[in-house]
Image (tube, coloured by chain):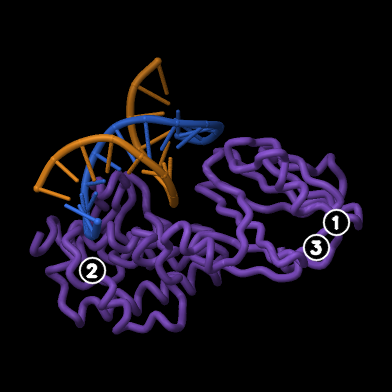
Chain colours: A purple, B orange, C blue
DNA sequence: AATATTGTTCAGCA
DNA sequence: GTGCTGAACAATAT
């Protein structure tokens, strides 16, 4: 969005999915966007914020499969275009999402939206130092993978990167937070940072990740890239957690 | 044809 | 009240 759609006048919008663009009484989203321009972007956790020259913010969540596409001819419109912006320069920006699991909304400010959704600090927030991270998890009774994925505690980590972090640290996903030492927590924090930075660097494409990572092998018949052991899969908080029974233990320690 | 998949929300339990 | 888990949701691939 930064590279393409900033500072262009918005002529009109098209809402194709009422599911994704909820909270749109009287088409007030069109009223808020028409004849405005995006001036800046921010990110918090899994949300993208596009700041308008009116001071309001368009908020986008991409669910599992959503992405943005900028193009000129409508012949290039993506197949699952759920929300479309027409700019004055003749280009369009489409919110494309084969599975309609995302969300598009308006917010007065990033802080207000954060409060509304009760989102914790962004996982890469510089103010979230190791000590703050440890304190946020202190006293929790649940499993470490669930805690990492809990957006109220920490915003930005989902199923795949929580698995990757725990794989690299050698901790079983069902391990209780309580049972982890301060030293282990510090290691989790450092690894989480490194995993996210790698993911951003590789544009979140699994095939571009280092082969030593879990991500490229994370399938039901995948093997551990470090020891060759067949990966195991268990449910944690309703999600499939993949792990290496050899390097992360065959069952949680201190569960 | 049935199952797995993703994040969020919400019901319900401890 | 709080923390936590699991079901439900949509749409697609396998």
Residue at image point 8% right, 64% down: A254
In the picture, which quadrant includes the C terminus of chain A? bottom left
Whichever of callouts 1 and 2 sits on the residue coming sooner in the sequence is 1
In the picture, which quadrant includes the N terminus of chain A? bottom right
Mark 1 sits on what residue? A35
Task: Report the mark closest to the observer, 2 or 3.
Answer: 3
Q: Is residue A40 visible?
A: yes
From the viewer's side, name the closer residue of A35 and A149: A35
Task: Give the spatial CA distance, label 1 vs label 2.
Answer: 53 Å
- The tag on residue A37 is 3
Residue A131 in the image: state x and y as whole percent: 29, 84
Q: Is residue A247 visible?
A: no
Is A172 placed above or below A85 here?
below
Residue A210 in the image: state x and y as whole percent: 45, 68
Do pointers 1 and 2 mark residues of a single chain?
Answer: yes
Task: Determine contact: label 1, label 2, CB under 8 Å.
Answer: no
Horizontal side of A92 relative to C9 (left or right) equals: right
The quadrant where residue A81 appears = top right
Residue at image point 59% right, 41% down: A22
Q: SS of the residue at dot 1?
A: loop
Mark 2 sits on what residue? A170
Residue A126 in the image: state x and y as whole percent: 46, 83
Horizontal side of A70 relative to A247 (left or right) equals: right
Q: SS of the residue at dot 3?
A: loop
Circle 3 chain: A
Q: SS of the residue at dot 2?
A: loop
Task: Determine contact: label 2, label 3, CB under 8 Å.
Answer: no
Whichever of callouts 2 and 3 sits on the residue coming sooner in the sequence is 3
The quadrant where residue A249 appears = bottom left
The quadrant where residue A118 appears = bottom left
From the viewer's side, name the closer residue of A54 and A82: A54
């Amino acid at each position: 969005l930064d590279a393409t759609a900033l500072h262009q006048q918005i002529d009109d919008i098209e809402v194709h999915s009422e599911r994704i663009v909820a909270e749109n009484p009287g088409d007030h989203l069109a009223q808020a966007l028409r004849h405005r321009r995006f001036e800046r972007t921010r990110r918090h956790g899994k949300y993208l914020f596009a700041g308008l020259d009116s001071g309001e913010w368009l908020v986008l969540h991409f669910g599992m499969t959503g992405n943005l596409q900028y193009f000129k001819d409508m012949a290039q419109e993506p197949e699952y275009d759920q929300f479309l912006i027409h700019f004055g320069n003749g280009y369009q920006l489409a919110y494309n999402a084969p599975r309609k699991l995302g969300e598009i909304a308006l917010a007065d400010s990033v802080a207000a939206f954060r409060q509304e959704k009760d989102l914790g600090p962004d996982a890469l927030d510089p103010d979230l130092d190791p000590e703050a991270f440890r304190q946020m998890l202190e006293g929790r009774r649940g499993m470490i993978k669930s805690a990492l994925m809990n957006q109220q505690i920490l915003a930005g980590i989902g199923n795949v990167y929580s698995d990757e972090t725990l794989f690299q640290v050698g901790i079983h996903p069902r391990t209780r937070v309580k049972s982890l030492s301060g030293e282990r927590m510090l290691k989790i924090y450092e690894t989480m940072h490194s995993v996210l930075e790698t993911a951003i660097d590789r544009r979140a494409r699994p095939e571009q990740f280092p082969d030593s990572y879990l991500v490229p092998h994370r399938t039901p018949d995948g093997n551990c890239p470090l020891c060759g052991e067949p990966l195991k899969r268990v449910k944690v908080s309703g999600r499939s957690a993949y792990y290496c029974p050899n390097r992360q233990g065959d069952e949680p320690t201190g569960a």
